[in-house]
Each structure stands twice: as structure tokens, then as C-alpha cells.
Image: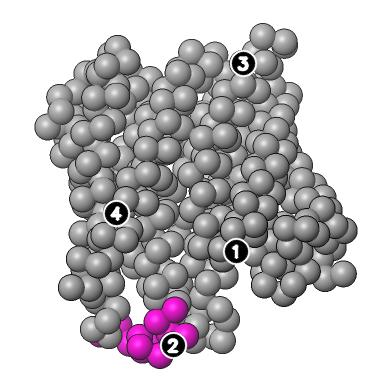
């Protein structure tokens, strides 16, 4: 009974997340030319996606706690608490993006003996990291607002929703920024 | 005011840097196997799917264990029956999800005109093997993290998801190349 109940509750959500993963993977599959032309690009991909996933889910769960503590609600959303959270998330994204770019460039030079363009890699990570950060912040606020309006518990909804949409949005942003930098530089 | 951007960065940066370091290791393995991924792009599409499903199943298991420990229906014992029940359900859930998604990925790749280089049965076999081994690793990580953090007096809810997704991402990439090597080479 237990197994059946859990399969019924979790399987649809897992398949849905998997379909999101396929969309992200399909985007990655379109990037084969870019991956060949920009050495080191593939190294940053898991790190940027994980960075985004981590920052946005903690952002979402802090907003959830803030709601339960009565600090924010649908009518009082854009206050100083939220601004501090947004600022913290974005600065954190920026700092970790630079770290990812530097490390990926170093690894490409040391272990793979190919000469990457560190400036290119670092710029791609920063643009992709910040752009996806801004998109996901806006998305989180919209989701949180809708959840508050309907009186649901944000803790049950923001996590899976952000995990699924986060991967897709981040993959799009990596693709876009790599293409932009490749054309520009 | 309870949130400040400085605190968010001070608490977030160390854990996030560690997480990104492990993810870059995973990315480096992808760089090492880049030729396989570019020649058989269906594997490139599969990576975000493998990781997102694995991370989700690990997080669900972790959250269930955390709640069970908090409420007292699960005890800190590796022979706990309720824990075994959850573990077996995760494995079952993983195998069903990966099997369904493998078929979808295959036909998405086929219909979008990618060069395949692999048959349906072979692909399902590879994805199921990777998925099964990954869920084993992830479940083990999830149980150990939940038990250890609970034992030390921390809330497992804070630890399981980030630990499981980070270790799961890297393990998923390593397992994929390992199984590709066993089946195809």
C-alpha cells in the first residue's frame, strides 16, 4: 500500500521534472558547435546549473520561512526584507560565477593541455550566472506571489517548480551567453 | 529586519564554493569525454535528465527520512524497517522513471534528426544501468546525510538536498561514461 501510494504521488512530478530535463538536455545538444569551438565551456555547465539551483532554492525557501514568520505576504511583498534577499542572492551569484570561470580556465590549461580563452570563459559564466539569476528571481517572486494569493504553503511548491524551470532557464542563458561571446570576441 | 545581504553571502559562500568545486570535477570528466558526447549527442541530452531525476529522488527520500526522524517513526538504525521501505520505493521509483524517460529521450533525439549511433534497446539498457546505480549511490548518501545531521542535532532538511544533488550530479556523469565504456567500447 505504502509503495503504491508513494508511486502515485511522486511519479507524475518526477516525470514532469524529467521532461524539463529533456528540454534542458535538448538545448545542450544544440550547443555541440559551441562546445567544440570554446574549450572549457563544457566544464562550467554542471557548476553553473548547480549554482543556480542552490541559490534559487535557498532564496525560495527563505521566502517561504519569511511568509510563515509573517514578515512578507501578498500585499506586502516588495519590502526591505525581500530587497536584502535579492541583493544577497545576486552578489553571491556574481562571486561564485567568477570562481567557476577562473577554476574552469585553470583546469583546462593544466589537465587538458588546451589553451582556452580565460576571458571568454569567465565572461560567459558571469553573463549566464547573472542573467539566469535575474530571470529566476523574478520567477520566484511571481510564484511566491501566486502561492500567497491562493493561500498555499510555499514550501511545497517553490522547490520542485524552481528545480524544473531553473535548469531550463539556466541552460538557455548559458547557450545565449556563449553564442553572444563567441560572436562578439 | 531579519535578513541582510551580508549574512546571506557569509553563510552561502563557503558551502556554495565547495559545491561548485565538486561540480567542476564533474564538468572536467565531461570535457575528457567530450568527443563521445558530441559524436553521440543523445548522451549529451541525457545528462541533465539523469541528474535532475536523481537529485529529485534523493531529495524526496531525504525529506521523508527527515520528517520520519523528526516525528519518531524512523529510528537512527541502519536496520530500520521503515527506512528500508522508503529505500526500496526510491529504487523502484527510479527504475520506472528512467525507463519511461529513456524511451522519450530516444524518440525526441530520433525525430529531431540527430545522428544516433545507438539502438533503442542499447540506449534503454545504458540509461537504466546508470539510473539504477545512481539511485543506489544517492539513496546511500541521502540516508547517511539525514542520519548524521540528525544525530548531531542539526535539521536534516537543511543538509540533504544540497549534499545529495551535488554528489549525485558528479556520480551521474562518472557512471554514464563508465557504463558507455562497458556497453559500447
Residue A126 lies, in percent from the top left, at: 72, 33
Residue under the point 32% across and 30% down: B43
Q: Nearer the viewer, mark 3 or mark 1?
A: 1
Q: Secondary structure at mark 2?
A: helix
User: Separation of disc 1 and disc 2 at Cα?
Assistant: 25 Å
User: Separation of disc 3 and disc 1 at Cα?
Assistant: 42 Å
> Which mark is first along the chain, 4 or 3?
4
- Quickly name the residue at label 4: A11
User: Separation of disc 2 and disc 3 at Cα?
Assistant: 51 Å
Q: Nearer the viewer, residue B154 or B2?
A: B2
Residue A168 lies, in percent from the top left, at: 51, 35
Q: Quadrant of the N terminus of chain B?
A: bottom right
- Quickly name the residue at label 3: A179
Q: Secondary structure at mark 3?
A: helix
Q: Nearer the viewer, mark 1 or mark 4?
A: 1
Q: Main secondary structure of the magenta part?
A: loop
Callouts 1 and 4 on one subunit: yes
Callouts 3 and 4 on one subunit: yes
> Which mark is first along the chain, 1 or 3?
1
- Quickly name the residue at label 2: B71
Farthest residue to the left: give it: B121
Range drawn in magenta: B67-79
Residue A156 lies, in percent from the top left, at: 51, 63
- Quickly name the residue at label 1: A151
Amino acid at each position: 500500500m505504502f509503495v503504491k501510494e508513494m508511486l502515485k504521488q511522486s511519479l507524475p512530478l518526477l516525470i514532469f521534472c524529467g521532461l524539463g530535463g529533456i528540454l534542458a538536455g535538448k538545448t545542450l545538444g544544440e550547443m555541440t558547435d559551441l562546445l567544440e569551438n570554446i574549450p572549457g565551456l563544457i566544464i562550467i555547465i554542471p557548476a553553473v546549473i548547480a549554482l543556480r539551483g542552490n541559490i534559487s532554492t535557498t532564496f525560495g525557501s527563505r521566502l517561504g520561512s519569511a511568509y510563515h514568520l509573517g514578515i512578507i505576504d501578498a500585499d506586502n511583498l516588495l519590502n526591505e526584507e525581500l530587497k536584502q534577499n535579492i541583493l544577497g542572492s545576486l552578489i553571491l551569484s556574481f562571486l561564485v560565477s567568477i570562481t567557476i570561470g577562473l577554476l574552469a580556465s585553470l583546469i583546462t590549461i593544466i589537465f587538458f593541455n588546451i589553451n582556452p580563452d580565460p576571458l571568454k570563459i569567465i565572461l560567459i559564466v558571469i553573463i549566464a550566472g547573472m542573467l539566469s539569476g535575474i530571470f529566476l528571481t523574478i520567477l520566484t517572486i511571481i510564484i511566491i506571489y501566486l502561492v500567497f494569493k491562493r493561500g498555499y504553503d510555499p514550501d511545497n511548491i517553490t522547490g520542485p517548480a524552481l528545480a524544473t524551470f531553473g535548469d531550463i532557464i539556466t541552460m538557455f542563458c548559458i547557450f545565449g551567453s556563449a553564442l553572444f561571446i563567441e560572436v562578439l570576441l | 529586519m531579519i535578513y541582510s545581504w551580508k549574512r546571506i553571502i557569509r553563510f552561502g559562500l563557503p558551502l556554495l564554493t565547495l559545491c561548485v568545486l565538486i561540480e567542476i570535477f564533474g564538468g572536467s570528466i565531461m570535457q575528457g569525454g567530450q568527443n563521445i558526447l558530441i559524436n553521440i549527442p543523445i548522451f549529451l541530452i541525457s545528462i541533465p535528465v539523469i541528474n535532475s531525476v536523481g537529485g529529485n529522488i534523493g531529495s524526496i527520500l531525504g525529506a521523508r527520512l527527515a520528517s520520519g526522524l523528526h516525528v519518531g517513526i524512523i529510528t537512527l538504525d541502519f536496520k530500520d524497517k521503515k527506512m528500508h521501505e522508503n529505500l526500496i520505493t526510491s529504487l523502484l521509483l527510479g527504475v520506472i522513471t528512467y525507463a519511461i524517460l529513456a524511451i522519450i529521450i530516444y524518440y525526441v533525439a530520433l525525430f529531431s534528426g540527430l545522428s544516433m549511433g545507438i539502438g533503442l534497446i542499447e540506449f534503454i539498457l545504458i540509461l537504466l544501468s546508470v539510473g539504477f546505480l545512481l539511485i543506489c549511490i544517492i539513496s546511500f548518501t541521502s540516508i547517511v546525510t539525514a542520519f548524521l545531521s540528525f544525530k548531531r542535532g542539526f535539521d536534516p532538511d537543511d543538509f540533504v538536498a544540497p549534499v545529495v544533488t551535488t554528489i549525485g550530479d558528479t556520480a551521474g556523469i562518472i557512471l554514464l561514461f563508465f557504463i558507455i565504456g562497458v556497453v559500447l567500447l
